[in-house]
């Protein structure tokens, strides 16, 4: 059987054009520090668009991904989010309180 995880969410950057960002999910192993990076599929989020009308392209900030954890070491992983500006190449790393575990 395959070890899989499903994640969904959004990555709004207040005060910026959210269409200019690439999103990455970073999995950080709590035991050995190993990092895994995944580029999720982006999706439209009308709920975010309707709640942040003064922000630019926030409806484009949604993401979904199905993660195949087969090649990952066993253990607990912290889930972090990184967005990279396509123009300036600067990035923002957001540590979350979420985690997943592979047995």
Image: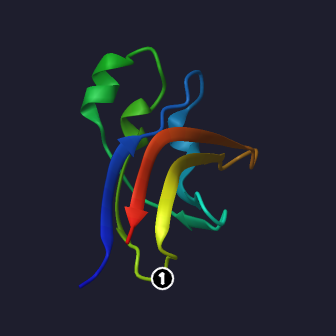
Of 10 and 20, which appears nearest the observer?
10
**Rendered image quadrant of residue 61:** top left
Report the number of numbered marks.
1
Compared to 92, does 53 lie above or below? above
The residue lying at 56 percent from left, 32 percent from top is 17
Of 52 and 74, which appears nearest the observer?
74
The residue lying at 28 percent from left, 21 percent from top is 50
Q: Secondary structure at mark 1?
A: loop
Q: How is the image coloured?
A: rainbow
Of 50 and 29, which appears nearest the observer?
29
The residue lying at 51 percent from left, 39 percent from top is 96
Which residue is the extreme one toward the top?
54
Neighbourhood count class around disc 1 (C-alpha, 10 Å): few under 14, some 14–19, many 20 upward: few
Compared to 29, does 44 lie above or below? above
Compared to 96, does 103 lie above or below? below
Counting from the top left corner in percent of width and height, residue 22 is at: 56, 51
Counting from the top left corner in percent of width and height, residue 49 is at: 33, 26
Q: In which quadrant of the rendered image does the N terminus lie?
A: bottom left
Counting from the top left corner in percent of width and height, residue 18 is at: 52, 36
Q: In which quadrant of the rendered image does the C terminus lie?
A: bottom left
- Residue for badge 1: 71
Counting from the top left corner in percent of width and height, residue 91 is at: 70, 44
């Amino acid at each position: 059987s395959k070890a899989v995880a499903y994640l969904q969410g959004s990555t709004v950057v207040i005060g910026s054009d959210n269409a200019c960002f690439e999103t990455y999910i970073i999995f950080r192993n709590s035991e050995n520090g190993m990092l895994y990076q995944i580029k999720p599929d982006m999706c439209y989020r009308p709920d975010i668009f309707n709640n942040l009308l003064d922000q630019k392209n926030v409806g484009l900030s949604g993401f979904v991904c199905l993660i195949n954890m087969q090649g990952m070491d066993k253990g607990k992983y912290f889930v972090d989010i990184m967005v990279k500006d396509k123009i300036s190449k600067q990035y923002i790393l957001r540590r979350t309180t979420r985690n997943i575990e592979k047995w």
